[in-house]
Amino acid sequence: MKASQNGHCNTPPSLVPPETVLMLSKSDGLVASKSRHTFTALFFLLLLLVSIFFFSKRVLEPSVSIYRDASIQPTLSLEEYAVPVATLDPLADPQLNEDFSRQSIAPIPEFLSRTEPKNESASVKDGNSNGESGSGVDAGLSIETNLSRKKVPKMCDFYRGTWVKDNEYPLYEPNACPYVDEAYNCQGNGRPDLEYTKWRWKPEGCDLPRFNATDFLERLRGRRLMLVGDSMNRNQFESILCILREGLSDKSRMYEAHGHKITKGRGYFLFKFKDYDCSVEFVRSHFLVREGTRVNAKGNSNPTLSIDKIDKTAGRWKRADILVFNTGHWWTHGKTARGKNYYKEGDFLYPRFDPIEAYKRAMKTWGKWIDQNINPAKKLVFYRGYSSAHFRGGDWDSGGTCNGETQPILSGAFLDNYPPKMKIVEEVLRDMRVPVILLNVSRMTNFRKDGHPSIYGKIRMAGKKVSTRRQDCSHWCLPGVPDAWNELIYSNLILQQMAKASHRSKPH
């Protein structure tokens, strides 16, 4: 074998061992296979990363339509939250009245401010919520009624707030209004203090408009306002006569149509305001359902109450354009509270019947009558809620007292009281077809233990000692708390007009 020029032996290919050739072939195949697997893995990894990128972009950056569908709209139109149009029509719109348009009207205040009430040096703060509703049935703007389909934003609840001292009050001079009967004329009957007349109701988050008697009369022009209920509504009726009288330059242009002097013995009064072609009336109806009598086995006459029949005075109700109803205090009296041989349905006299259930059925009877007889396109209905009493050591007929109270209640559990009857009222209003504005005054009256006549419900005779045995701690001195209820009616009429004007300005 010859050596090559470089000194190495050349081995012919044919002489390479077959095992070596086989090992080299396998090695080349493994390298190629690994390269292919690596490329495939990288390809799928890259594809996965791209997919994750696009998926993440889709999730993290949703389309604008998602925001449009969200329920967090920044603004809401008044039309969406307006009362049904039918409830607005019965109110006189002074701006559309040619004579009225030439007269000066006080500017309408900003009701819907979200600002907190100013810190008052002398004020009584509202307590915590206990779940009752404000205006209408749902809390919120007083303009909301039992038929509002959407909840009004809680900008201002007229019925939660504060009593603040105001030196411009009262709205009329004590012992100066001839329409306050003896039972409510506390100053005329010798009450020595005046602090109870200096409080003004201020809702949370807004102010009520300053009361303007002339403007109120203009809003009543050509209308009949009727208060229907028990002596608490007569209390309110006398208040509204007195505050409207302040808007008259000639007081003789207001008078009782039949010449009657207001007394608790008479059940109907009609006061006319000649210059405004309007009237304010009171119709006594203790229960809003029908009172009656039955003759027992001994031949004696006993009272009954038909909770399925409307009161006999209902014929008068139909004549009014604006109605203000109430009932409540008579449901705590004697026969009514005991429920023994007293409540009737049809011709059946219940031997015993729960007075709360009787109240509920009576309210449903009233609600049914309203639905069947009131056209909401022509009439407006209010229901004024239960007014709180403040007896100490007993009730009205068992030695309860409130004499000597000169300041409102400042704190305590009593401020959170909410009568079960008011929850029944709310339930009935929710089921009615005709819109009813609820004047929910229960909480605002809880504070005012200082506002009752107590021993000053009768004229003090010279040299005669005043009896303290029976005191009136349920009705109210005038001027006093019922004036605030009528300010709420006035405020509601302004809100109605505002909503009406807004609706007319909307493009159709």
Image (spheres, rainbow, N blue to C red):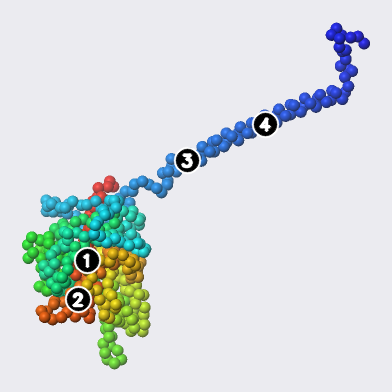
Within-10-Å neighbours for mark 4: few <14, some 14–19, many 20+? few
Going from N to C along the chain, the mark reached first, 2 or 1, is 2
Q: Is residue 184 left or right of residue 251?
A: right
Going from N to C along the chain, the mark reached first, 4 or 1, is 4
Q: Quadrant of residue 135?
A: bottom left
Residue at (13, 76) in percent of width and height = 459
Within-10-Å neighbours for mark 2: few <14, some 14–19, many 20+? many
Going from N to C along the chain, the mark reached first, 3 or 4, is 4
Q: Which residue is mark 1?
A: 481
Q: CA distance from mark 4 to mark 2?
A: 102 Å
Q: Which residue is mark 4?
A: 40
Q: Which residue is mark 3?
A: 62
Residue at (35, 55) in percent of width and height = 150
The percent coordinates of residue 305 (x first, y second) are 29, 79
Q: CA distance from mark 3 to mark 4?
A: 33 Å
Frontmost residue, 498 versus 23: 23
Residue at (57, 34) in percent of width and height = 50
- Give the residue furthest to the top: 5
Secondary structure type for disc 1? helix
Frontmost residue, 85 versus 22: 22
| Residue 445, placed above or below residue 349 | above
Secondary structure type for disc 4? helix
Q: Quadrant of residue 13?
A: top right
